[in-house]
């Protein structure tokens, strides 16, 4: 096998773009498993986490299945990158100290790092009302607001902890929405996932606060493979948010996460993502490869909505999906994807209508700047059983400059004649006249761009919880710096 | 009464200004002095260069200045970026205001106000103070508050866009306002309201240049000077009576006198 080194050691953030505000590394000794992937590594990960036998078996099955795929990642996406050497990656990296039991035990350096990221771990911090689970490299560092949530019976903890404390729930639902054989990256994740968040909302409970997980890749050359599982029991509601950053590194980092959502009858899950993984520098060096499988199943009258603002990663390959299984279930997808410099994004959604009178809404906004290339790829599938299914899809692209590209690839498969499908698409440019209009009112060219782009995204930002809408808009601004003006 | 040439330097002084778009020469030598406290009306047939003049003063990139000089408050204007001119207090009400989909009017206007304040060494305006000021201006120019909740000009009717320009002018309180056919496309009530908005801005410190085709707005806003622009040149200047004369005789009269070399 000949592969180029894609994920390799060293290179500090100082050599790279000073522009990436989140590009510092945290100096903590890592507990690293040796590089490379084999059965022993899978066993080691499982042993480190003191996992039960069934989970080890599940991982091993995934690993054996992955071997059969012969390192063949899917090729249909509109992204280009040199082959990844999967034996040159660390599959397990944990901060050295043992898992902390309370906030007081968390390494101050880690706390400081999260503070730099603007993520409050202290319970009385700025974003009061948000429970945060911070995942640094592969291990959950601290979870705030435990007590408040416990009172309502809400479980919000690292998935590794849930395996110990609520094994029956994990065993019942893990892999139930995204089976380990689902796709190349999901299979890899199933074999080596290290941590992630677990959420369980009991029957009839409306989760009183927003739940948030913050992911950060710190270790150089490490892959990050989180696994998130959210279960909303009948008639419950939860709003969950994940934020992601990574240090600026000269080499690429691999991120292959799996998220599974289970929305039981009459429940609602709102899942929001702000993704700002390091996108690579201006010449396309470094950056995170983000290959993510996100899927939810909506039972009777249940609703799942995905809202995402993605400004980071060198490559994004991501299609949050909803299986509209129960009658009258609802799926929504609201997305802003920004690509700048040499970023590539192939992203979209899948809505699979099975139940009667199921409805889905897709609003995808793509912004391309610099030499960025954005592809929207969406599938709407209506199965024969889905009488009265309805879909509305709107894809808008905004081009900033003339070296970037935007592509829309909608797939529609309708097997039921009563289905109603609506599709709208538009491509626009930030016009010189619009810029001049803003300038004439006193704005700089850069601020004018930012204002127009923000306006373009307004419908999506409205779907985010308020604080995060502000953060999302700030994120866009930072990501656009240098591209305009 | 406006300041006269004797005791003041002009707020805006245009000398021998020529400008083109691509290969087309549009302004062929404009001379004009505007003093604080004055209102100048610029009239002239379609395509004579009125909008070009207003846009060149505001710094629109579509035009190339090929000669001449412009001083605004003593500063050479033509080298400045459009946003700097705006921050110095130059405002252009567009003949065709642009739509900014999704952009909140509130944010748009506050960005303009703050940019100008920072330019003048002041602090940004607090959200509350701005809110109150905006509400007062909405009442003053009698614009439908629901329009302001929408995105800037998105889906506005022609007349609504013009009224929105007047609101922006009232909020930004420019030193020099260039109104490019703000009266076109307005119904009779709107014309009166817009005129009041302009008259409210009128003060010994400010100046207004009004581009118009119609005498009727000048019934509400009495100009100190009226100029006729013809083929890129100011061919005639006078008092309010000149507008009256144009209304009666049309532009052919001007054309004839120009052709005759008068
Ligand atoms: N950006 C441009 N590119 C090419 N030609 C232009 C441009 N702007 C103006 N022109 C031309 O210059 C001439 C003057 O245009 P301008 O818009 O200044 O006229 P105006 O006096 O404002 O006319 P109206 O009364 O119709 O608004 C016209 O012939 C017009 O076609
Ligand atoms: Mg004009």
Image (spheres, rainbow, N blue to C red):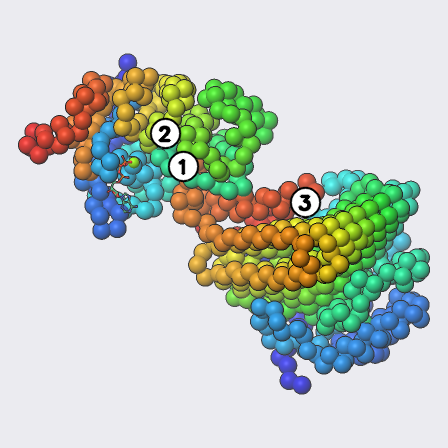
Q: Residues within 10 Å of mark 2 (few under 14, many from 20)?
A: some
Residue at the spot 51% in from the left edge and 25% down from the top edge: B144
Label 3 lies in ligand 1 vicinity (Cβ under 8 Å): no
Mark 2 and mark 1 lie on one chain; the one further toward the N terminus is: 1
* Disc 2 secondary structure class: loop
What residue sits right under mark 2 in the picture? B185
Marks 3 & 2, CB-CB < 8 Å contact: no
Image x and y of residue A387, in percent: 73, 54
Q: Which residue is mark 3?
A: A464
Cβ at disc 1 under 8 Å from ligand 2: no
Quarter the N terminus of chain B occupies: top left
Cα separation, mark 1 vs mark 3, equals: 31 Å
Q: Residue at x 57, y 26 (%)?
A: B131
> From the viewer's perspective, is the residue at label 2 or at label 1 nearer?
2
Which chain hosts label 2? B
Residue at image position (21%, 27%) is: B227
Residue A470 x, y percent position in the rendering: 64, 42
Q: In the image, are marks 2 and 1 on the same chain? A: yes
Left or right, A115 with respect to A81, comes to right
Q: Secondary structure at mark 3?
A: loop
Residue closest to the far left: B260
Q: CA distance from mark 3 to mark 2?
A: 40 Å
Quadrant of the snapshot with the C terminus of chain B: top left
| Left-right relation of A467 to A284 | right
Identify the residue at image location x=57%, y=47%. Answer: A457
How many residues crowd mark 1 within 10 Å: few (<14), some (14–19), many (20+)?
many
The front one of A259 and A84 is A259
């Amino acid at each position: 096998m000949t592969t180029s080194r894609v994920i390799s050691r060293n290179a500090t953030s100082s050599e790279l773009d000073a522009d990436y505000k989140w590009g510092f590394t945290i100096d903590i000794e890592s507990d690293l498993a040796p590089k490379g992937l084999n059965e022993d590594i899978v066993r080691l990960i499982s042993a480190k986490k003191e996992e039960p036998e069934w989970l080890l078996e599940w991982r091993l099955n995934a690993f054996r299945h992955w071997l059969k795929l012969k390192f063949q990642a899917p090729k249909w996406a509109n992204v280009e990158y040199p082959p990844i050497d999967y034996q040159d990656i660390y599959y397990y990296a944990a901060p050295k100290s043992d898992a902390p039991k309370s906030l007081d035990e968390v390494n101050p350096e880690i706390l400081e790092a999260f503070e730099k990221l603007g993520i409050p771990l202290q319970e009385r911090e700025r974003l009061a009302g948000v429970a945060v689970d911070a995942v640094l490299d592969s291990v959950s560092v601290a979870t705030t607001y435990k007590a408040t949530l416990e009172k309502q019976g809400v479980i919000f903890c690292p998935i590794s902890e849930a395996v110990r404390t609520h094994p029956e729930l994990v065993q019942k639902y893990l892999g139930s929405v995204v089976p380990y054989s689902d796709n190349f990256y999901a299979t890899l994740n199933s074999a080596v996932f290290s941590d992630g968040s677990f959420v369980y909302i009991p029957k009839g409970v409306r989760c009183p606060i927003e739940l948030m997980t913050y992911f950060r890749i710190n270790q150089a050359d490490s892959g990050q493979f989180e696994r998130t599982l959210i279960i909303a029991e009948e008639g419950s509601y939860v709003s969950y948010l994940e934020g992601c950053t990574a240090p600026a590194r000269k080499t690429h980092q691999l991120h292959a996460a799996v998220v599974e959502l289970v929305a039981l009858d009459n429940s609602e899950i709102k899942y929001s993502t702000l993704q700002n993984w390091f996108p690579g520098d201006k010449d396309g060096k470094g950056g995170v490869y983000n290959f993510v499988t996100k899927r939810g199943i909506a039972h009777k009258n249940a609703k799942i909505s995905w809202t995402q603002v993605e400004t980071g990663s060198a490559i994004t390959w991501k299609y949050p999906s909803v299986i509209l299984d129960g009658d009258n279930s609802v799926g929504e997808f609201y997305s802003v994807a920004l690509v700048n410099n040499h970023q590539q994004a192939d992203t979209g959604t899948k809505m699979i209508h099975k139940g009667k009178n199921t409805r889905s809404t897709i609003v995808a906004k793509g912004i391309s700047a610099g030499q960025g290339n954005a592809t929207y790829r969406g599938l709407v599938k209506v199965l024969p059983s889905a009488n009265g299914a309805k879909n509305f899809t709107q894809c808008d692209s905004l081009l900033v400059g003339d070296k970037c590209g935007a592509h829309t690839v909608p797939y529609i498969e309708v097997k039921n004649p009563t289905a109603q499908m609506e599709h709208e698409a538009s491509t626009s440019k930030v016009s010189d006249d619009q810029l001049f209009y803003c300038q004439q009112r006193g704005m700089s060219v850069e601020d004018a761009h930012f204002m127009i782009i923000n306006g373009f995204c307004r419908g999506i930002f409205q779907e985010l919880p308020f604080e995060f809408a502000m953060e999302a808009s700030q994120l866009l601004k930072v990501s656009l710096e240098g591209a305009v003006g | 009464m406006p300041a006269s040439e004797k005791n003041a330097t002009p707020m805006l002084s245009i000398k021998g200004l020529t400008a083109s778009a691509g290969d087309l020469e549009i302004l062929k030598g404009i001379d004009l002095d505007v003093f604080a406290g004055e209102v100048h009306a610029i009239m002239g047939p379609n395509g004579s260069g009125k909008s070009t003049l207003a846009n060149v003063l505001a710094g629109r990139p579509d035009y190339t200045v090929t000669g001449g000089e412009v001083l605004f408050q003593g500063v050479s204007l033509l080298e400045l970026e459009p946003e700097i001119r705006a921050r110095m207090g130059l405002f252009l009400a567009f003949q065709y205001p642009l739509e900014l989909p999704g952009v909140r009017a509130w944010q748009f206007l506050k960005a303009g106000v703050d940019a100008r304040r920072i330019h003048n060494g002041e602090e940004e305006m607090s959200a509350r103070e701005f809110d109150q000021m905006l509400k007062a201006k909405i009442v003053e120019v009698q614009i439908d508050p629901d329009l302001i909740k929408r995105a800037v000009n998105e889906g506005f009717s022609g007349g609504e866009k013009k009224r929105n320009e007047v609101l922006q002018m009232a909020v930004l309180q420019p030193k020099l306002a260039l109104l490019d056919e703000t009266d076109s496309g307005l119904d009779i009530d709107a014309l009166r309201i817009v005129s009041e908005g302009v008259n409210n801005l009128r003060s010994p410190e400010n100046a207004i240049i009004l581009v118009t085709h119609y005498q009727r707005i000048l019934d509400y806003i009495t100009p100190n000077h009226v100029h006729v622009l013809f083929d890129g040149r100011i061919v005639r200047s006078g008092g309010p009576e000149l507008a009256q004369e144009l209304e009666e005789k049309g532009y052919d009269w001007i054309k004839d006198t120009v052709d005759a070399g008068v």
